[in-house]
Each structure stands twice: as structure tokens, then as C-alpha cells.
Image (cartoon, grey):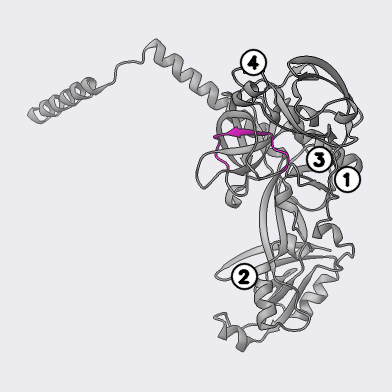
Amino acid sequence: MRTRFLALLALSFVAQIASAQTAPPPSASQLQAQAEARRLSEAFVAVADRVSPSVVQLHITSRDPRAEALQQWFGSAQGVDSPIARGMGSGVMFTADGAILTNNHVVEDALTINVRLRDGRVLPARLLGRDPATDLAVVKVEGQNFVPARLANSDAARVGEWVVAIGSPFGLGYTVTAGVLSAKGRGGLGMNSIEDYLQTDASINPGNSGGPLCDLDGRVIGINTMIVGKASGIGFAVPSNMADRVARQILATGRVQRAWMGVGVQDLTPELATALKLEAKPGGGGALVNQVADGGPAYRANVRPGDVIIVVASKPVHDAHELIRETISHDVGETVVLEVVRDTKRFGASVILAARPEPPVPPAPVQQQVVPQPGYGLSVRDLSPQQAAQSGLPPKNACLVTAVHPGSGADRAGLKQGDLVVEANGQRDPTSAHLQQAAQSGQLFLRVRRGATFFYAALQK
């Protein structure tokens, strides 16, 4: 009886302590804040669900210049291919038939391009065209059931709104990061000849290049292209309006033409405005013309050095960058009306835009390869049981992978030089003869050992 009483007393004491430590119920304002946080969280989840099927990983092979230099210095065996480097980037599907937007710097040195989709498919891609001036490129895969992303009007994006970046930083596929749109119209970074970037603090790292920057409606407002410094938290994306214009031209003609007025301009600083006897306006008041191409569109419209362009196509011009950005948003052959100040007097000028003089873009290595590679792109040799044992393997027959051709079925399956084939189409411990016989079926299903790990690989011609 006494034991039961002590037990009940102890339980009562514990209950009193627990009651004293119980937190008070949340207030109405706390509940509202929690609900808003959940709604924002659900918005991020919805963006990831909606956009990820349109995001792809780009697996690139290119020549390794460092290894090539060593090979030239020390010599190499006859018939050995040039050393190959591998890289990765991101891209976003923007048409239902497999056209993908990415960065030029991702593919410009590519020997081969393979695309991994969200559903696990790995498809070879061909490069349709690239535009170094904006660091954009378009590649294409063949297949079905592609999910194109929706492109937003990047001009309507507002500084301070939430944005989401999706890509493969450091090879970590389909990584989702969030931040805000920090600024628009960023230029003067010296990275490309045409710069009109969206700035964001959403985490962007190597491997994100070419992936989408999205709004909370799951629409693409930019193509992520670069960061400033290391771990600075500042990233830049090409606006979707510019990317769409470039991509559509590449799809249509394989190249990009940009509108050109034929002027060199600079910002109108307060000091320059004073020297020209003009009123200096806060935030800038026009673009000062410092050069006019002889016989060019602006010259034919009576624009001369020393003029100040204050309006283009009914839009006020605050600085030189704004004039350039507005000009290239129009088509070649289109007429734009300027408002110009000369000697404190205003006049109008109609300029018929011409094609901007630009050197032709040389073909990338992947565009120069026109000879298809037969077979699986796989070379092997036998390892005897003694050689296998010397390599730390069980003393059995094995096939050593001696070469994998870039872009081949073996390459797409992830095989590498030095891998060991331990099973081929159900045949354990195969020799090269077994592998050759199995290959006649038109497909290979291999179990492969790499170091201490094993994996399966499916190859098709």
C-alpha cells in the first residue's frame, strides 16, 4: 500500500513539473507567421516540382590541354587518343522537341555532349549554335516526352522578389536554392561583349551554369551564367527575354544577328552635362555620343559626336548601357525614333537599325566531328588469373577496359578506362571473346568493378 502511494506521489510530482515546463500556446500573430512561412515553403516546393522535369545535366568531354602538353613533352604510344577531360553543366529544355538552352562556356570546347534528363535518360546532344557575346548556346536531343519550361517576361521581374535557382552545382544534380532578385541591368563586368544581367543572392556555384533562375510561378526569368569571386553570394543570369531572342534565332538560322545603331556612347556625368550646358539630372540624363560609324544607321539619321540621346523608342535613356540594351531588344531592319539634344536644342531622328558587325562564330569541336563512331566505343583486353591476382582481384578471368571513345554508348553508360568487366549479358568472368560474342545481340548488360565498388551498365550501339 505504501509503495503504491509513493508511486502515485512520484507520478503527481512529475506531472506538476511537466505542466510547469509546458510552453504557452502560440499567439494569433505567431500562428499567422507560421502559416505564411508554410505557404512560402509550399511555393518553393511547387517551383521545384514544376521546373525540375525541364532541367538537364550536360556531361561534356573535351581535350585536356595539360595532359596533352605532358604527352607532347614525354611522348606517347602510337594510336593513343588525346587525353580527355570531363566537365558538367546545366541546361533547361525550352521546346517540346528537345531544344535546350545553356551557356556557351559550357559547350564551346566540347568534343561530345551528353544530356541526362530528370527521368534518368541519357541522350547524345548536338550543338545547334552558340553566341559568345551573351554566353548562350542551344543544344538539341532527339526523343519524346520532353517537358519544356515556361519563359517569363524578364522585364516585368521586380527587384526584391523571391527567385529559385535549379542546377547541378559541383555535379549535385537538381539542387534547388532560393534567394531574391537583387538587381537588374547589371553590366560593365568585362565578362562578355553584351552584358545585361539579373543579379541574385540565390546560391550559384560551378555546375549551375546554364540552369534556370525562376520566379515563384515556376517561370524562367534568367539563365544562370556566372558568379563574382569565390563564395561571394553574388550570381548573375542572362535575362529570359534576351535568352529567348538568341535561342529563337539559333533555332531558325544557327546564328545570331543583333540590331546596331552605329554609335559609341558613354554615360552623361554631371561634369560632362555642365560642359555641354545641359541640366544634370539625378540618376543620369542620357547617353553621350562619342563616335558615329561613317555611313552607319545613326550617321544617316544625322546623329553626330557630341549629341546626347535622351529617348529611344519612347523610352527615357538614363545611361549608355540602357541605350545599348534597348537597341538590341529590337530587330534588324526595324526603325526606332530617337530624341536627341545638340547645343541645348532637341530634335528627333529616325534610325533604321542594321545588323551589328560581328565576326562569325567558329564551330565548336563537337560540330566538326562528322564521322560517326561504330559499335559501342569500348576497347578491352583480357587479364589472366595471374594478372588479376597481381591487381588485388580474385584469380579469375576478367576484361580490362583500355579505352572509351567520347560520346559513345560506353561513354554514355559511364564506363572509364581502367574499369573491369566482371559479367557480360549474364556470363560471369568474361573474356574479350565472350564480350565480343555478347555484343552481337545489339546490346550489352555489364557488371563492372571500379576500385572496390561494383555497378551495372547498359550499352547500346
Q: Which residue is mark 3?
A: 145
**Magenta: predominant secondary structure element?**
loop
Inspect this view and state whether residue 421 appears.
no
Q: Secondary structure at mark 1?
A: loop
Quadrant where the N terminus is found in the figure: top left
Q: Residues within 10 Å of mark 4 (few under 14, many from 20)?
A: few
The residue to which callout 4 is attached is 279
For the residues labelled 4 and 1, the Cα–Cα distance comes to: 46 Å
Inter-mark Cα distance, 1 to 3: 24 Å
Q: Earlier in the sequence, mark 2 or mark 4?
A: 4
Q: Marks 3 and 4, Cα distance to the nearest angstrom?
A: 59 Å
Read off the residue under disc 2: 449
Report which residue position mark 1 lands on: 254
Question: What residue sits 10% from the left and 28% below the top?
Answer: 6
Per the image, label 3 sits on a secondary structure element best described as loop
Q: In the depicted view, which residue is nearer to us: 320 or 103?
A: 320
Is the residue 117 above or below the residue 221 in the image?
below
Category of crowding for the residue at label 1, using alpha-carbon neighbours closer than 10 angstroms: few (below 14), some (14–19), many (at least 20): some
Above-or-below relation of 385 to 347: below
User: Closer to the N terminus: mark 4 or mark 1?
Assistant: 1
Say whether disc 3 or disc 2 marks the residue closer to the N-terminus.
Answer: 3
Query: Quadrant of the rendered structure where residue 372 is?
Result: bottom right
- The type of residue carrying mark 1 is Gly
What residue range appears in magenta? 193-204
- Residue 153 percent location from the top left of the image: 73, 25
Label 4 residue SS: loop
The quadrant in which the C terminus is found is bottom right
The nearer-to-camera label among 2 and 4 is 4
